[in-house]
């Protein structure tokens, strides 16, 4: 009888989660279906009725301006992959230092990082552009990569994870055995922090992949555009050329595929590392 009483209460959270999943998946489903429609089918058929123009859309997209879509894709992989790797490395080292070392100004630095989390990226975009323009790095790959490396929230996550995952006794034992700071970081701290680093990498990769404002402000040469800005230029041109809408939808669909592949690939390592850490603890 008590289980029958509790059962309706458990249905409500499940229903809310299903509604949230539907809300998130519905636009993706529409893009998936719309990308299969030809120019004539896009505005003349039912919303979720599959079309017959996927292959022609792909061919037109890859041929557009001599394959500039692939260049945008490579640029995005450079920005997201390189920026996420560098940000993860900087965040892991910084978080470990803030968690395990005592030095003057440590609390002040941490408080400044917490304050940096509260500052929207929109507020920093224009000052960053003026700074990079002053030193001659505006409209370069570095103008998009460098601002992504130092990420306060990632450093905060790394500090929290290092505090919980790296025992002080283990570090002290390493020091007694003669290990230096670099060896302790490389052989002890970083392996224990690996699940947290995977989390930071995923967060940063997705954030940089979807970032629009920073590259839109920093870059003027469309040969350096990421997918977000490149597809925006297609959308702007589509106001006068409706035939480009098929390319926009197809490009949007393809831009989601690497993110899905990344999560499916790294989820296995993420869950394995978390399970391993739970067993060790």
Image (tube, rainbow, N blue to C red):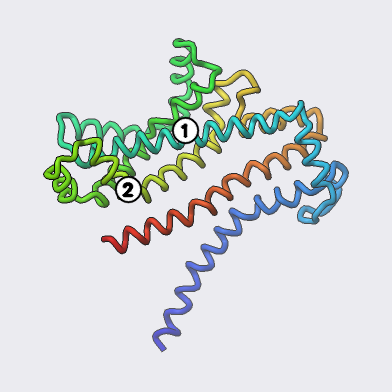
* Circle 2 crowding by C-alpha within 10 Å: few under 14, some 14–19, many from 20: some
Spot occupied by residue 184 in the image (x, y as percentages of width and height): 23, 41
Residue 168 placement, left or right of 117: left
Spot occupied by residue 123 in the image (x, y as percentages of width and height): 44, 26
Spot occupied by residue 92 in the image (x, y as percentages of width and height): 33, 39
Spot occupied by residue 98 in the image (x, y as percentages of width and height): 23, 37
Q: Please, which residue is most extreme toward the front here?
A: 177
* Circle 1 crowding by C-alpha within 10 Å: few under 14, some 14–19, many from 20: many
Camera-side residue: 222 or 174? Answer: 174
Residue 74 falls in which quadrant of the image?
top right
Q: Secondary structure at mark 2?
A: helix
Residue 216 falls in which quadrant of the image?
top right
Camera-side residue: 12 or 253? Answer: 253
Residue at 71%, 32% (x, y): give it.
235
Label disc, if present, on residue 191 of the rendered structure: 2
Label disc, if present, on residue 83 of the rendered structure: 1
Residue at 54%, 48% (x, y): give it.
262
Quarter of the image containing the C terminus? bottom left
**Labels 1, 2: front one:** 2
Residue 243 placement, left or right of 263: right
Q: Secondary structure at mark 1?
A: helix
Above-or-below relation of 14 to 99:
below
Label disc, if present, on residue 224 of the rendered structure: none
Residue at 45%, 54% (x, y): give it.
269
Camera-side residue: 189 or 132? Answer: 189
Residue at 63%, 47% (x, y): give it.
257
Quarter of the image containing the N terminus? bottom left
Q: Please, which residue is most extreme toward the right here?
A: 40
């Amino acid at each position: 009888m008590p289980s029958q009483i509790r059962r309706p209460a458990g249905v409500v959270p499940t229903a809310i989660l299903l509604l949230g999943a539907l809300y998130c998946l519905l636009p993706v489903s529409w893009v998936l279906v719309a990308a299969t429609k030809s120019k004539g089918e896009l505005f003349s058929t039912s919303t979720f009725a599959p079309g017959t123009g996927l292959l022609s859309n792909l061919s037109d997209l890859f041929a557009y301006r001599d394959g500039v879509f692939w260049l945008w894709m490579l640029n995005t992989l450079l920005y997201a992959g390189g920026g996420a790797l560098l940000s993860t490395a900087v965040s892991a080292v910084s978080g470990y230092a803030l968690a395990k070392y005592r030095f003057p100004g440590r609390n002040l630095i941490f408080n400044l990082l917490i304050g940096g989390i509260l500052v929207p990226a929109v507020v920093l975009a224009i000052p960053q552009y003026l700074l990079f323009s002053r030193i001659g790095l505006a409209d370069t790959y570095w103008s998009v990569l460098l601002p992504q490396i130092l990420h306060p929230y990632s450093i905060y996550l790394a500090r929290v994870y290092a505090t919980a995952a790296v025992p002080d006794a283990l570090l002290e034992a390493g020091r007694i055995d003669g290990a230096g700071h670099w060896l302790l970081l490389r052989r002890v701290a970083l392996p224990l922090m690996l699940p947290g680093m995977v989390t930071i990498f995923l967060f940063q990769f997705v954030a940089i992949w979807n970032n629009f404002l920073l590259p839109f402000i920093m870059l003027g040469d469309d040969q350096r555009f990421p997918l977000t800005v490149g597809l925006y230029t297609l959308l702007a041109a589509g106001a006068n050329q409706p035939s480009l809408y098929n390319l926009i939808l197809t490009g949007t669909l393809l831009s989601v595929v690497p993110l899905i592949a990344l999560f499916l690939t790294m989820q296995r390592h993420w869950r394995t590392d978390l399970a391993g850490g739970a067993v060790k603890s």
